[in-house]
Amino acid sequence: MKFKKLLRFLILIIFCFFFCSTTTVLFAEQKKASQPVISNQPSSQPLPTTPSTIPTPQKRPEDTNINIPDIPVIKSFIISFSGAFSKDNQALAGAKPSLYFTWEVERGVGGSSISSIVVEKLEGPGPEVNFRTSELKGYRVFPVAEPLSSGRTIYKITATNNKGRSASSTAFIEVFSFRQAAERVQLASISMPETEMEKTFNLNLTFLNRNNFGVSFQILVYAYDGSTSIPIALRNSENPEGTWGIYLDPSSSKEINIPCKLPIRDERHYWKRIKIIITHGGEPATSSRNWEYPLIIEIKRVFRLTR
């Protein structure tokens, strides 16, 4: 009897223990399920973002409003004179060289083709020039029919593309009168041997041209006694008037020997100076281009230059 009561008591204790354990586990599982799950693995769900972190959508090329320049580009437009009478874009009046036009044009950034290139005279006394071409790079030569007149002449080039947009540039030529050019011609040196009267001698002259163009002129040599001047340069078949011509290249110097003869004068009239004048086509130079050098006349009628 006692054994049965003890067995029942043990069974009751075991049942109570099992019941309490199961209840504790179920409560723990419910509490765990109610807490947020933290994981180191990337989540498939997008994280919420703040307005400052939202990327700005990029515009598609067709959505952008970019102004691409589509204007022709004139890389160069140069005018020069061909021939020996000039250098670059300067020349001497009266000369008849040819005008030499060179140009180079490119398409604009937009890439539109160049439909026409026009070169024309804007203003000035220079030759009339007006031509059209489609060559993006080229040159044209125009012979000058009439002698050049002094002054500045401006020419213009205009390039137009097939969208009707154009670009222009200008260049000029400069023509100087002989009076202007003579201001930049210098008599660098003069010499002669000691010579007797009525004897032929060579007058050695060196001229310096500081112009950017060639200059041609005639040289007159006179003896001066204080009141009268007479030409003393000898005449020959090449120089029947006793004028000796010379051409100076741009920015250069040149020497010339002119045969001369000084006539005898009486004791009351003796030569005091040698005078040198340069002219061009009958146009005399300014007074600053007339050079005079004193002479020493000795008793034996021998003379020489003195500086």
Image: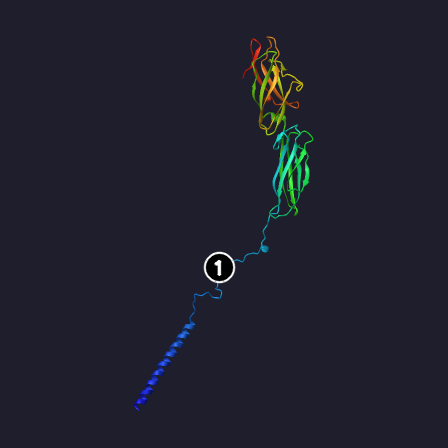
- The answer to whether residue 260 is seen in the rendering is yes
User: What number of labels is visible?
Assistant: 1
Q: Residue furthest bottom?
A: 1
Which residue appears at 68% of the width and 40% of the height? 132
Corner quadrant of residue 125: top right
Quickly name the residue at label 1: 53
Q: Position of residue 284 (x, y in %)?
A: 63, 22
Image position of 164 (left or right of 20): right
Q: Position of residue 273 (x, y in %)?
A: 58, 15
Q: Residue furthest front?
A: 237
Corner quadrant of residue 10: bottom left
Q: Is residue 49 above or below residue 150?
A: below
Q: Residue furthest right?
A: 145
Q: Is residue 68 above or below residue 260?
A: below
Q: Position of residue 62 (x, y in %)?
A: 59, 55
Corner quadrant of residue 18: bottom left
Q: Is residue 248 above or below residue 298?
A: below
Quadrant of the snapshot with the C terminus: top right
- The answer to whether residue 209 is seen in the rendering is no
Q: Position of residue 301 (x, y in %)?
A: 58, 10
Mark 1: few/some/many CA within 10 Å (<14, 14-19, 20+) = few
For the residue pair 73 and 252, the one nearer the viewer reads as 252
Q: Say which element carries label 1.
A: helix
Q: Label 1 sits on what residue type? A: Thr
